[in-house]
Amino acid sequence: MSCSLVQCSSFHKTRKTHLKSVCLQYQLCLLLNCHFFGLLKNEMGLIIFFLCASVPKTAAGQCKWAEVLKDLEQIKTSKDIDVSLYTANTDEDKECQEPVMRCFFLETNVILQECLIKNCSKTQDVLNIWKNGNISFEKNKLNSTTSAKCKECEEYEEKNFTEFIQSFVKVIQKECKH
């Protein structure tokens, strides 16, 4: 292999987080090739290799919503988004955390529609937020249960875009601490 770890490090600086895992896997592969290739000749070596290959692709300690937070930072100052949105409370019970997150992501679709109509400058960032939310909730759809005491999205107060984004950021930061 002609690519070096130095090239891989510069790759880290130029790509988003989800691509960093590819580079990490490449580094592990180089390490295996250089130092542990002999292990692959026996059964234990193969077991170790497959266990390493199945390691989750998110960095240790990193919140799964980190990319959403970055995109929220990008859109929060947008002047061309003017909508009223159902804004969940940031202090809901822990058992209502998933419906609260779901509400924020549902309302992101309203922002996206507004951006598409007005051709606003932050459309791609809004689309990224919406996609990340949909992907995450689609994966968890089967396990999802909502307590009867949790509010529906439409039961929350409508707030302006700036207040909505501030609350959304607080909820995600709270989620990331858990």
Image (spheres, helix red, strand yellow):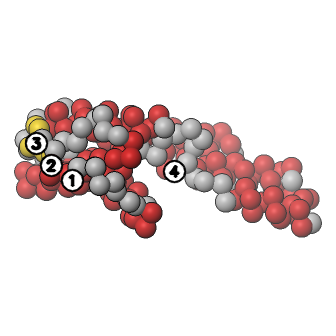
Vertical relation: 96 (above or below) 43: above
Residue identifier under label 2: 155
Upstream in the sequence, badge 4 or badge 3? 4
Which numbered tag is attached to residue 19? 4
Nearer the camera: disc 2 or disc 3: 2
Which is more toward the observer, 170 or 100? 100
Using residue 117 as the reference point, say whether residue 175 is left or right of it: right
Inspect the image, locate mark 4, and give the three-letter code of the amino acid beneath it: Leu
Residue 165 is situated, as x and y percent measured from the top left of the image, at 22, 37
CA separation, marks 2 and 1? 5 Å
Residue farthest along the front direction in this orientation: 148
Quarter of the image that includes the N terminus? bottom right
Residue identifier under label 3: 158
Nearer the camera: disc 4 or disc 2: 2
Vertical relation: 175 (above or below) 134: above
Q: Residue at x 65, y 39 (%)?
A: 6
